Amino acid sequence: MFDRREVLRVGLWAAAAPALISPARAQSDYPSGPMKALAMFGPGSGADAKVRFYANKLSEKTGKAVIVENKIGAMGNIATETIARSKPDGYSIYIAPGSSMLAAAPQLFKKLSYDPINDFEHITTLNFSAFALCVAADSPFRTLDDLTAHLKQKGEGAFYGSGAPPSVVAAEIYKNNFGLKTVEVKYRVQNGMFNDLLSGQVAFTFIDFISVAAHRTSGKVRILCMACADRLKSAPDIMGAREAGISGLNIRNWWSVHVPAGTPKAICEKLEILFNEIAIEADTLKFLEVNGSDPMPGNSKMLRELLVQETKDWEGYAKLAKLEAN
């Protein structure tokens, strides 16, 4: 369970600077009509559910409709491009996994029609989760040591599944830690990778914790550790990578809020305050806990600095995992 006092303390600290701004400075008539929140993946997906939750909370706060529009394709890049080219008036909002949709974008796409740093006003962070190192529940691997010993013995005769870029990078860091020769099997569809994991065709994979949490509950998979260094507050019974013995692995999938560059400062400040209030409300904490995520309230300065740093980090990740841009 979350330590709500700690979350509140962090939230109040993170929101302190914008909260000191007089509300009179924010446009008093904003928002005066419905807003639009873009979701980068299809309806019913875990990402879509998060966007809809925050959109609904924003609607409750403002008393105005926040319509979720799904812009699917190019690993979320179409939605990102759409926001970058939208009118900078505060009525088009991007609620997205900024760690992969913006920080990793220069390494995932050969040509970008937008600048991930300068074509947006970066409002605040919201929450974070991580990928989980998963094995089939009926496998003999009860600990990371069990899995590692098996993979060392098998050499190139063992296989692992990879999907999204964080999955690829996490697996490479794990392999490098222990000198493993395990062979990568790439999957475009997560269901196929999951089925091969259960059937024993691949020994392990890193899967987004949100996507695999239900399968863990149902007893289909066993999670050996997370791809972030420390334990998640929403999953305190699962070791972080550092505790499990994987050094240098700390990939957090953080969500954030962005609007087009040039959006008036007063509107950005108002959105920052609203989303920081939302980030630590009781029903938000409950939603995050159920979905395997931890709250991560912040502010615009922190988010921009984080984005700049992780954009540099992804240069190193891409080289390590030999990622090829699409």
Image: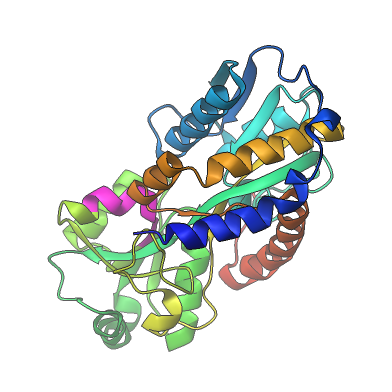
Q: Nearer the viewer, residue 250 or 22?
A: 22
Q: What is the quadrant of the N terminus in the image?
A: bottom left
Percent of width and height locating residue 94: 64, 34
Tell me if residue 135 comes above or below residue 249 in the rendering.
above
Q: Please indicate whether residue 78 sits to the left or right of residue 209 in the image.
A: right
Q: Going 62% across and 54% down the picture, which residue do you hit?
A: 12
Residue at the top extreme, as displayed: 33
Q: How is the image coloured?
A: rainbow
Classified by dominant secondary structure, the portion drawn in magenta counts as helix
Q: Nearer the viewer, residue 125 or 14?
A: 14
Percent of width and height locating residue 313: 68, 67
Q: Nearer the viewer, residue 201 or 261?
A: 261
Whether residue 189 appears in this view of the structure is: no
Q: Please indicate whether residue 290 sits to the left or right of residue 285 in the image.
A: left
Q: Going 71% across and 33% down the picture, which residue do you hit?
A: 81
Percent of width and height locating residue 77: 64, 38
Q: Going 50% across and 76% down the picture, which residue do you hit?
A: 173
Q: Is residue 207 magenta?
A: yes
The residue segment tinted magenta is 206-215
Percent of width and height locating residue 98: 63, 48
Total tally of numbered discs in the picture: 0
Whether residue 134 appears in this view of the structure is: yes
Q: Please indicate whether residue 301 sits to the left or right of residue 213 in the image.
A: right
Tell me if residue 225 comes above or below residue 25 in the rendering.
below
Tell me if residue 98 comes above or below residue 199 in the rendering.
above
Image quadrant of residue 139? bottom left
Image quadrant of residue 196? bottom left
Q: Is residue 263 magenta?
A: no
Q: Going 56% across and 22% down the picture, which residue do you hit?
A: 59
